[in-house]
Amino acid sequence: MIQTTQLSKKYGNAEVLHIDSLEIPTGQSFGLVGNNGAGKTTYFNILLDLIRPTTGTITNNNIVVNTSEDWKSFTGSFIDESFLIGYLTAEEYFEFIGDLRGMNKADIAKFIGQFDEFFNGEIVGKKKYLRDLSKGNQKKAGIVAAMMGNPQVVILDEPFANLDPTTQIRLKTIIKTLTENRDITVLISSHDLTHVTEVCERIVVLDKGNVVKDIVTSSETLKELESYFAV
Amino acid sequence: MISHFLNLEWKQFFRSASFGKSIGVKILLGFFALYFILMFGILGFGGYYILKEQFPTQDPLILVNSYLLFAITGDLIFRYLMQNLPIMNIKPLLVLPIKKNKIVHFILAKSSVSFFNIMSLFFYIPFSFVLINEGYATAGVLGWLFLMILLIQSANFLNFLINKNNIALWVLALILLGGFLVQRYDVFNLAGFIGQGFYFVYQNPIYSLLGVVLLAVLYFLNYKQLKNQVYLDEAIATKVKEANASDLSWTEKLGDVAPFIKNDLRLMWRNKRTKSSIWMVAVGLLYGLFFYPNPVYASMDFMYVLVGIFSTGTFLINFGQFIPAWDSSYYNMLMSQNFKYERYLKSKFTIMSISVVALFVLGIPYVFFGWKVLLVHFAAMIYNVGINTHVILYGGTFNRKKINLDEKAAFNFQGTGAVQWIIGLPLMILPMGMFALINWLVSFEIATLTLAVLGFIGIALHKKLMAAITKKYIANKYVMIHAFKQEN
């Protein structure tokens, strides 16, 4: 689904990302881990064509992301709060995103209805603008918006950060059901090794922009990762 | 301790991210300040002689005194609208071992050296100087000046007590208006009465100490109020407003641009920065009233163009000049959403065009100043829709500055760059110059027609122009994404 070839990003002389080859097949739940500055967000930003690579390309479903915009119709993403429109209420925001993704009012209501438990009564019907919600609740709204309109690729940067324990567990269930039928590819980055090993079947470790580990998740994975990061 | 605070303030000023970038704006503000200082200074030095010449039979000091009531109320209204309590960034200080009293005193002391308090001194001090020079009692004049300084400081602290209270604003406006009417129709010589009070202080300077009492009381009230508010859930807290959802389903008639237009309408209603811009639109619409009643301008046909372009295009200019910076805080998201850039720009074009037509309709009463005026306004409307919308959208591709929607608009130059100043040229000066030239060479009718025809050409070429503009936006996409991420 997503092919990365000879990708690099340089700022001046500093190379922040260098991936020779990385292929993510359709339906995989893919986890990206690494310390601060490892290049996780940079990778996602290039994948979303928000920054340009210095060399190389990423293709998303055979579309080179920085030459055509067609990938936008099947890719949902949430990187950070700058993806939210602060002066809208959550409902209005979902309506806006839904509109752009070709959903009608009934579709949107039905879709949002599935997440009642996840929202825990704190997002919808609260008469609050997104900018006035807590960080965790903002994140919940953003994550759900990223899944609107039947995307084939869902990209979430640090989805577990700022969430309370209950919501973290619920989010894990949501991500697992998303990849159950193996037609949606999910990309997640995280600092939390436990969560990411639980939901991802494959984990790639980045360090200073380079792929240093590429693991198919097994019962040993968490230990392996912990010993890698314990330096 | 105070030196610590001052040190922090200093660093805050010089290390703010926008310091180097917006130096042009700072210089401009500096010029404004200099202009005010100069005008006040000239009035201060020359005021005595001007009054003497205009009203040879009256004492200039008494004349000045009699208008102090209006000056002070006006000053309060001005402060009410412009001045904010300088709550410095005290959140991180609250948990440090610093007494709250000290923090509060510092905030208050800092406010008393604000520009608002210094500005009018540029009038009062030279004026007093001249008075002494002209043989007024030195002690009396100094007492009077002392009282003025105290009153300015009192106004400063009174403003913080009444600020955010709309009733207070109305009361002030009422005093100003009531005082004016009372004076105008000779009901009661209010100004003279108040003026006598000030003259009394001149005669008995010891009474200026009453000002000290007033100032002390106001300072104490401020201190008490503020001390109760240095908690995270009080003054420092960001206020959470209940969302007001209005039904915007009528926008759906506009087709595929509806989601964006809905957003833009909400953007305007729900953010401080844009809300105050809406007032600017009202002012822009009434712009003609500054010119048309004046026979000097009424005979200059090309002024109609200026007023026409401005009054029908005031929204276009206010809103359009910051496209796409209005959306800067979530530009990343927009750029990864499923829509074509053209649709986004089309929505901006639609909203601006609607505003131009609506403002023209609202401005129809200008026909009172002659059918020629309305005719030119009509042509200006077409010119606005056909040419200026495209020009301003094109200008938007040069926008590189983020806009923080939560800040007030008056004197807020955030997001302003060279573009905003330069774009005014083709928007207003060009049609005006062209009109003036043709009007002079050929005739009024042809000049008006030319304006309209140009507008129609723009409308006819709309698709092509938009395609070119869109291309330019896409080419600038990454630069804008990067620039909008920078906090100023």
Image (spheres, rainbow, N blue to C red):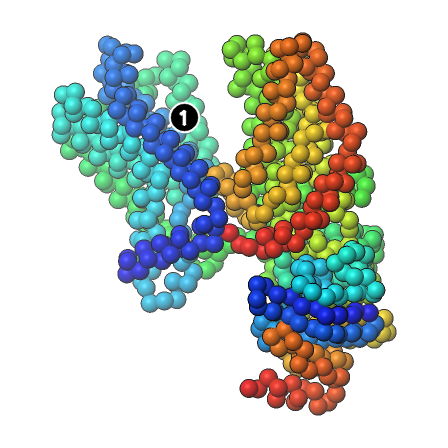
Please say whether residue A28 is visible from this viewpoint: yes
- Where is residue B362? Give x, y as percent: 66, 24
> Is label 1 in a helix, a strand or a loop?
helix
Observer-nearest residue: A76 or A39? A39
Quarter occupied by the N terminus of chain B:
bottom left
Task: Residue at 13% x, 28% y: name it.
Answer: B138
- Where is residue B465? Give x, y as percent: 75, 36
Task: Residue at 71% x, 32% y: name it.
Answer: B353
Task: Residue at 47% x, 58% y: name it.
Answer: B233
- Where is residue A198? Give x, y as percent: 72, 81
Left or right: B447, with B216 as reference point? right
Q: Mark 1 belongs to which amino acid? A: Leu
Observer-nearest residue: B33 or B222? B33
- Where is residue B318? Give x, y as percent: 60, 35
Residue B454 against residue B55 in the figure, above or below: below
Task: Residue at 25% x, 14% y: name it.
Answer: B52
The answer to which image quadrant residue B45 occupies is top left
**What chain does mark 1 sit on?**
B
| Residue highlighted by disc 1 | B176
Please say whether residue B72 is visible from this viewpoint: no
**Number of numbered markers:** 1
The answer to which image quadrant residue A16 occupies is bottom right
Residue B383 against residue B443 in the figure, above or below: below
Left or right: B25, with B273 as reference point? left
Dot 1: few (<14), some (14–19), or many (≥20) neighbours within 10 Å? some
